[in-house]
Amino acid sequence: MPLQLRSDLTALTGYHSPQIAADVRLNTNESPYPPPPGFFEALQRALHEMPLHRYPDRHTVRLREAIAHHEGVPPASVFPANGSNEIIQTLLLAFGGPGRTACVFTPSYTMHTHIAQTVLTPVVEVKRRADFLVGGDLVAATVAELAPSIMFFCHPNNPTGLAEDEPAVRAALDLDDMLVVVDEAYGEFLGTSWAQEAVRRENLAVCRTFSKAWGIPALRLGYLLGSPAWIGLLDQVHLPYHLNAFSQVAGMLSFDFVDEMRARVATLTSERDRLYDALAARSDLTVWPSLSNFLLFRPVCDAETLWRGLLEHGILVRNFASRPGIENCLRVTVGTPAENSCFLSALAAVLSAVKPATAKLGFGVSSPDSLGSSAVCDEQL
Ligand code: PMP
């Protein structure tokens, strides 16, 4: 008999950002710029000296120190891992599990839900307000009704682009026995962070990554900031030597190029604003403001058709046409100025060729308040 997947996993849909070949890839919120040549030279030198026949530092001591120095926190408040996805998984393994519910405010980063489910943590998804914020009242009502053990925020939120509102996070933090996870994967674009507070409190975990502003997603590196009171408990659940030596060194060397990272962020932020202005000037779509390196927008026409049309022009963006809460939306990652200009030209060309969506689809009114609610379709395109 062929192997059967664990029965509770068969209904899960997995991570749906298809890796399709395209000239201009603006679908996964990566930086279009790698780190500078000096970083690669230093990494090569470090590789030559690396004792590859030995296991890496299990406690990632030097990397923790480097991160701590960069963040201005004690090393005992830092836990590095293979990207923020592994951090989320580690947190859920340690503090979730059967009988402990995780709460996610949707639309948001779907892996919070997905990872929780794979590690047998029951998840409740609570719909954000029409402005995509959560608000203190919704947090209070959710806690009163569901008493979750873990609550996820995303600051700024992917895919909507806005910062989490402070009253919502504060309302969650006031509950001492609930772990509050603030995912700051795009934090460098935002400028505000919950990191310092994570060190002082005992119920806040902040996740950061080298995959976005730092430009090294290929190396799978992220870190968690939290209280020394519980960070050590994570050693119970992560695999021994989970973080390879090369990624550890890459993380440490990244901090020698902070100015270059900030310059990339400045370029991308100004390009984001240029893209936003261009999209906002169009009457055939709605775009949401963003404090990140991507923009969510909803065309008046059928988003699926627009997505395919852009792909025919060599532009790959993220398709959320059937994602509950952001139906008929697409998300574009900010690329280089040339890539962004290509995207804008292709967008204009496709939109002038396609018909507006029929009234039956219900997307004729392109307002952030006109969010639909259910239609769950196949996102895997
Ligand atoms: N959190 C958010 C909000 C993200 O958008 C992503 C990547 N798309 C991640 C975490 C995961 O990043 P990584 O595992 O590469 O650090």
Image (cartoon, rainbow, N blue to C red):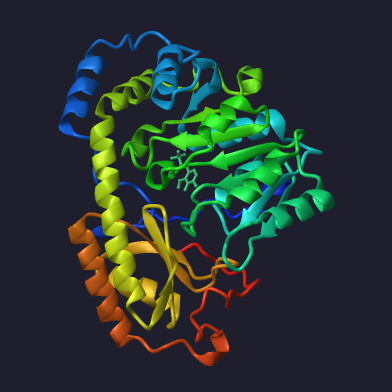
Q: Can residue 67 be seen by looking at this rendering?
A: yes
Which residue lies at the image location 76% right of the left edge and 51% below the top edge?
140
Q: Nearer the viewer, residue 367 or 100?
A: 367
Residue appearing at x 44%, y 21% in the figure = 68
When asked about the image quadrant of residue 218, the answer is: top left
Q: How many marks?
A: 0
Work out which quarter of the rendered image holds the N terminus and state it.
top right
The residue depicted at 50 percent of the width and 17 percent of the height is 74
Check the picture and name the quadrant holding the C terminus: bottom left
From this view, report whether residue 197 is shown above or below residue 327: above
The answer to whether 338 appears left or right of 376 in the picture is left
Height in image: 242 above or below 144? above
Determine whether 141 is above or below 81 in the image. below
Percent position of residue 77, x then y = 55, 21
Q: Position of residue 129 (x, y in %)?
A: 63, 64
Q: Is residue 238 above or below residue 177?
A: above
The percent coordinates of residue 59 (x first, y second) are 50, 13
Q: Nearer the viewer, residue 234 or 283?
A: 283
Q: Residue 279: where, in percent of width, then height?
A: 33, 72
**Quarter of the figure with residue 220:** top left
